[in-house]
Amino acid sequence: MVNILGIFTAIILAVAAFLAVKNNGRLEQEIANRATEENHQAQSQERMKAAQAVLNALPIERAEVDAQSEAKTKVETGLKESNDALESNIEEKANQIAANKEQLDEFREKVAEIGNIRELAPKMKEMRAELDELTQGITDSEASLANLTAQNTTIEAQATERKEELDTHNRGESLSSLKTSIRSIYPSWGFVTLSAGNNAGVTSTSTLDVVRDGATIAKLLVTSVESSSASASIIPDSIAQDITLMVGDLVVAGSNPKMKAVN
């Protein structure tokens, strides 16, 4: 009887020990899960702060973008007016050349109809001088026309360039010619500052690529732009865990469509 009671007692103690070990494992798992959740919550709060900073800056940046757009529109209007004036001058010179050529053709017809050269020598001399004058007039007009055409071509190219810049700016993109670098890095807040601003073609809310050794290693979202500097948030998940941004890294216009920061 004593042996049976001893066996039962041993079984009960073994079960109790098993349950204690199992409950202790569950407790440790719960503690680990809680720590993970607290870490995720802290990361979410940091992202929310960065997103709130971007949101607060948007009204000011929108006003700056509108002012820049208005200024570039005025420049484009001025270039168009200059181009129209040049086109009018070109048309006038072209008409003058046509009239001079018509006079020259009439003169040649008169020369062809001349009979006795000796009798008409004084008249031919006068007509030769007139011919030389007309020829010089045509040469001068053609040179003036060529000069006006070159000026018109230059102004059209400038107007096209300004229009492309304005269209790019209105699409919320930075200029494709942009080349700048990271000036400073604030990893705790998830943003960097750049060595160039809107004078170099940086546009607020545009996406930029960080390039190292010919490869894109991270993407940035521009949050604030000044004439010669800018600030940008590091887009989450755009940078690999084994990559660390460095001051001096090359920054160019984004190769992909504009992205939004993740909360």
Image (spheres, grey):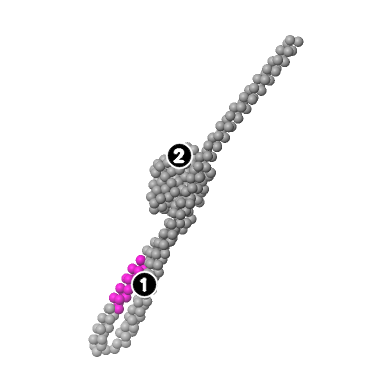
Most extreme residue toward the top, as rendered?
A: 2
What residue span does the magenta drawing correspond to? 134-151
Left or right: 137 as drawn, with respect to 231:
left
Disc on res. 89: 1
Q: Secondary structure at mark 1?
A: helix
Q: Nearer the viewer, mark 1 or mark 2?
A: 2
Task: Pinpoint residue 95: horizontal percent, then vertical percent.
Answer: 37, 76
Vertical position of residue 97 compared to residue 207: above or below: below
Task: Pinpoint residue 10: horizontal percent, then vertical percent.
Answer: 69, 15
Disc on res. 35: none
- The residue singled out by tag 2 in the image is 187
Q: Secondary structure at mark 2?
A: loop
- The answer to whether residue 250 of the structure is visible from this angle is no
- The answer to whether residue 16 of the structure is visible from this angle is yes
* Residue appearing at x 39%, y 53% in the figure: 199
The answer for how far apart the CA atoms under marks 1 and 2 are is 60 Å
* Residue appearing at x 42%, y 45% in the figure: 193
Vertical position of residue 88 compared to residue 246: above or below: below
**What amino acid type is highlighted by mark number 1?**
Asn
Vertical position of residue 151 compared to residue 178: above or below: below
Task: Pinpoint residue 214: horizontal percent, then vertical percent.
Answer: 43, 45
Q: Earlier in the sequence, mark 1 or mark 2?
A: 1
